[in-house]
Amino acid sequence: MTESKSTVSGTPATHVRMQGALNLALKHALAEDDRTLVFGEDVAKLGGVFRVTDGLQETFGIDRVFDSQLAEASIIGMAVGLALHGYRPIPEIQFDGFAYPAMNQIVTQMARMNYRTRGAAPMPITLRLPSFGGIRAPEFHGESLESVLAHVPGLKVVSPSSPNEAYQLLRQSIADPDPVVFMEPKARYWNKAEFDPHVPVSDYLPIGRSRAVRSGKHVTLIAWGAMVAKCLRAAELAEEDGVEIEVLDLRWLKPIDVAGLEESVSRTKRAVVVHEAPFSGGLGGEVSSIITERCFDSLRAPVQRVAGYDVPYPSGALEDQYLPSVNRILRAVQRVLEYRRG
Amino acid sequence: MTESKSTVSGTPATHVRMQGALNLALKHALAEDDRTLVFGEDVAKLGGVFRVTDGLQETFGIDRVFDSQLAEASIIGMAVGLALHGYRPIPEIQFDGFAYPAMNQIVTQMARMNYRTRGAAPMPITLRLPSFGGIRAPEFHGESLESVLAHVPGLKVVSPSSPNEAYQLLRQSIADPDPVVFMEPKARYWNKAEFDPHVPVSDYLPIGRSRAVRSGKHVTLIAWGAMVAKCLRAAELAEEDGVEIEVLDLRWLKPIDVAGLEESVSRTKRAVVVHEAPFSGGLGGEVSSIITERCFDSLRAPVQRVAGYDVPYPSGALEDQYLPSVNRILRAVQRVLEYRRG
Amino acid sequence: MQREGLILAYSPLRGQEAAQIGSGIALDLARDFAFPTYRELGVAVAMGVDLVGYLASYLGIWHGGLYDPMASRFGSINAVVSGSVLHAVGWAKGAQLSGDGGVAVTYFGDGASSEGEVHEAMNLAGIDKLPVVFFCQNNGWAISLAAERQIAGGTVAGRAAAYGIEGVQIDGNDVIAVLHATRQALARARAGDGPTVIEAMTYRAGPHSTSDDPGRYRSLDDEQKWLSRDPIASFAERLRAEGIADEQFFLAASAEAARAADAVRAGLAALGDRPGEELFDFVFANPTATLQEQKHAWQESTHD
Amino acid sequence: MQREGLILAYSPLRGQEAAQIGSGIALDLARDFAFPTYRELGVAVAMGVDLVGYLASYLGIWHGGLYDPMASRFGSINAVVSGSVLHAVGWAKGAQLSGDGGVAVTYFGDGASSEGEVHEAMNLAGIDKLPVVFFCQNNGWAISLAAERQIAGGTVAGRAAAYGIEGVQIDGNDVIAVLHATRQALARARAGDGPTVIEAMTYRAGPHSTSDDPGRYRSLDDEQKWLSRDPIASFAERLRAEGIADEQFFLAASAEAARAADAVRAGLAALGDRPGEELFDFVFANPTATLQEQKHAWQESTHD
Ligand SMILES: Cc1ncc(C[n+]2csc(CCOP(=O)(O)OP(=O)(O)O)c2C)c(N)n1
Ligand SMILES: Cc1ncc(C[n+]2csc(CCOP(=O)(O)OP(=O)(O)O)c2C)c(N)n1
Ligand SMILES: [Mg+2]
Ligand SMILES: [Mg+2]
């Protein structure tokens, strides 16, 4: 509990991987506030299976950064207890699918404690959850839990799509007094992009705001996590055909940026929402409904959903068949563009 | 394992409570197939906290109907193991909110086993889950988990709204070779209604089909569980004003009756979906999106959602403020009727 | 002890008064923290929790009660069986990290001991020798399931050894024995010697809850057997026998208890309705736009 | 033993050959059932599971493998740590109810022993004296966490007593000791005397998985210490010393193993691509209309 700020060097590279941006955000958070703690399975000496917590134990010591036993309910239960004691825990669940053993603690305890105690016991917990598919991993290493988690009263849910977003959103999540589930798109960990950790906090978009990562006037594509890059790719291809696609990185899956959706789609009059999770009951339904409720008069076509199928996330050999592809996205764009009222 | 069919008397009352209809369905299922087993917390001597399993242990013995230890993951894990051994388990989780400790077994094991084994190990499990609110109960005794469960690949999800539905749907769920989560609307356990267990199975609606419980031409109300009765009440009141409401009991929450929704709403051109679960990420978004995708041209107004708020299910004193009321339903009906394109 | 008269009014606690009062009074309110279930009225009494705020939960006013759990160092009522056992371990980790000498005491039942989370909690506490007391009230029943069908091996205390921690089974109906055992466990934890499992053998004299019907699963004989070991009656007898208290004392205590009960009753009656806004006000410390819009919509709807 | 040559090709199993082969060959394939994790190739070999079907899982072809778990009585590969331990208990309940004399053997690691489900499973098995063997391979590590930091009290076998069941800690690198212990546990279960926890002390000689980097958390010294206790080398030595096998035997065994490995390699190479339809075909035994529509849409999309 006695690390000084000087242990963190402030000289980041201009191009980093999301992995590195997250690591730096954790470093800065740990350096700034003694009450922050990082723990989870294999986060210490190993630095996490994705190395996001690499070097943190060395820098901040075994009291602030430590390995949890192999018991996910305990990881969250311990976070709740530490928060009750005044700490700001940043637990990690190693993979999306292993949030299920912790679901009771997440839903009935972590998310509910501020409410149950009438605000006496806020839960400034940031649960890091490496999420989504695309890395040809074993079973339950490619799940998309956002619609489940975003439905839980008392939770906030966010997913970054780039190193900059990763850094800023993680800092914001840690600073927020409420429990935030931070869904890291595994497939993007290794992608390098321009990165600037020196953006003043006052310039960060507020919690709950989406970001237009590309503007266009013919149709709005809405996505989060790794699907943002796919949508950008689709937009590039569509441009060759003269179709200008606006790509909205939703970022916050709870709360959803209702105003941002309305603003964009009331301009473009057409929308497609893209996610990896199974189609039925996915967050696409929520996004689609919000848009329809707000933009009914301007919509020229029903909002289209491009998603995974209603099947278990498959093994590597079938992964590409499951995940929304650039082609499937473009076909949906075509459908909304060509739609004519019957 | 040696109970004969003669132990079950076939003389039901013409008016019974849903509780009684469920009890009879279990009795008949236990009598017909030696491989069916009923277990859960307090289901044996106590007959379940809602008495749905009353008398079953006396009739079928301690091998077929038995109490589980207080460990929900075990209840589902045991069901999976018994199914692997050739049994047809009918486990009960005592209350909706206590499905969370079992979520890992439900999602990663029960729902996934048929897929994982390429069909070698089907899971003919019917998980009875007393569900939803309305009975002024303690915390986590009033949760609505349908959107979470309906999103899980490999699960089927159903909720009855009347004694007849309860009987038929429970028999169908037990007979189905796949895991079905059977959500019993607690608030309706004690409501008596006409009941006929002698309807031939061939007359049952197929799995996945909704039922129009009232027909009308001005707007379609879609609901399930205890909300069906509220919608019927709203329809009665609206009739006084000359508004003819069609009420669709969705019944199956997975798979959803897409064709039935399309048929009804393409006639009425207006729809309102009602549920108890929190608004955001609730199944209302799914239903609304399906309708918009299928009936975009005929819709005269955006589909309205009437739901719980994005807050924890409250204590009794605030319950009526939380639950969709007949008034809130009627206001939504009014909105879709009065909607004029801008 | 004077206050115990109060508890009698609250049937679900009947039979467990000694286990709860005896352990609750051992805590140091300046630094310890109790994690109750839904049946710890006795502990609340012993810790001086605002009883109107506590009982408000059972009137359907607020799930967690209206008392301040942080100020009273008695966590919110928790309806999830075993739900707060891990919190005690996390809190104890915090106490260990900060070196503040605090000890967490987690309450749970014989039924709860079957939940995986309790095992995880004991394992964690054992590994780091955390300052936590696992206080199990084995009252013989988890609703309708007898403890014999719940606890393989017969005892919860017996599990402690497997985790390398202390475990004691005590007479939960002997308030003095409970007090001693709890004090010992607290001292051990404070000294850095790690957790203790205390299994207080007692009996749930009443129904599980008002909607329960114990006649379906246990006999009157059973209940009678335990009546003879009523913790309040036997402690009163002991006080009399040892000349510590006379009839005068008991009359005064009864009167005091009645007065306290009256005050609580009056307080509950005065609580009145909850403002509907409270549906929304405590979901987040930093509320979301969506929720604020919903609150607004709700407010509008109340003006129709 | 001839077949063990094969296993060497599969690095994550290295070090645990004796624990897996010794236990796997003890099962009665006519009535027992094994519940593996993701590391039980040795058990699969011992039970005669189709190895091409088994290894297909590790080629990313099908999570659960392509072998038939019901026919081979070796459950599907399960990626959820501790996920199938409760299934073994449920299966054992089925065996007890039907009186078929079958025993379930569930495999799990030192890490898995921390999961609440394992505790729940032992408790249930203890209460009903179910015919199940809890076979824990304590290989010293759960990825990067050493068993000492995982297991309070130091042993998993030591927990058995708390549940009133048998528990033994054995040298997991001695194939004969493993075989005997497993046979004993199976016999006890079959006789109706209930479950046994076997903790086989062994060592994960390789990395946790191919993406792991053990250098970050353990020393070469550590690894060397265990190398001297290599289960295959020491068993071979014993066979030689006791005159049971000569060089001739080992040459033949090696040749046989090489042939088998070649056959598996050829089988894997011949597997080819999975038809995309399989995304949809096994989700339900009785598929839903929605899913059939999605399959149809997928089929259309492949024709563009
Ligand atoms: C996780 C969970 N499962 C089930 C229930 C329903 N339930 C409430 S109390 C109870 C029995 C608890 O028994 P025990 O732990 O012995 O405590 P006691 O009620 O005897 O004090 C049950 C099954 C619950 N509240 N939480
Ligand atoms: C529920 C769950 N949590 C986390 C993981 C990630 N994970 C895979 S293997 C492993 C370590 C398992 O250790 P142990 O049980 O000792 O088995 P071993 O790998 O040593 O055979 C972890 C943490 C998982 N697969 N499942
Ligand atoms: Mg009890
Ligand atoms: Mg291990």
Image (tube, coloured by chain):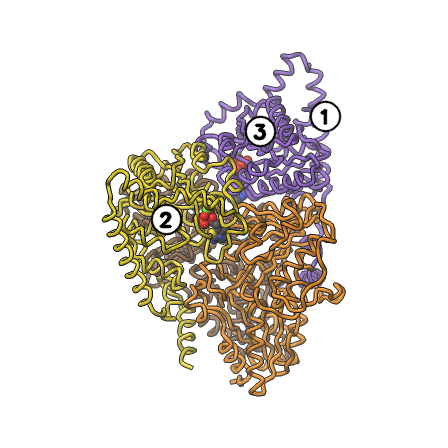
Chain colours: A brown, B orange, C yellow, D purple
Left or right of residue D217, residue D83 in this image: right
Label 2 neighbourhood size at 10 Å, few (<14), some (14-19), many (20+)? many
Q: Nearer the viewer, residue B317 or C220?
A: C220
Between disc 1 and disc 3, the foreground one is 3
Q: CA distance from mark 1 to mark 2?
A: 62 Å
The chain to which mark 1 is attached is D
Left or right of residue C245, residue B241 in this image: right
**Do the numbered discs 1 and 3 sit on residues whose CB atoms are within 8 Å?**
no
Determine if the C-beta at disc 2 is less than 8 A from ligand 1: no
Residue type at the position of mark 2: Phe
Question: Whole-percent x and y of residue D65?
Answer: 66, 43
| Residue C251 visible in rendering | yes
Determine if the C-beta at disc 1 is less than 8 A from ligand 2: no
According to the picture, the residue beneath numbered tag 1 turns out to be: D256
According to the picture, the residue beneath numbered tag 2 turns out to be: C35
**Do the numbered discs 2 and 3 sit on residues whose CB atoms are within 8 Å?**
no
Residue type at the position of mark 3: Gln
Determine if the C-beta at disc 3 is less than 8 A from ligand 2: yes
Determine whether C221 is above or below B131 in the image. above
According to the picture, the residue beneath numbered tag 3 turns out to be: D16
Residue type at the position of mark 1: Glu
The chain to which mark 2 is attached is C
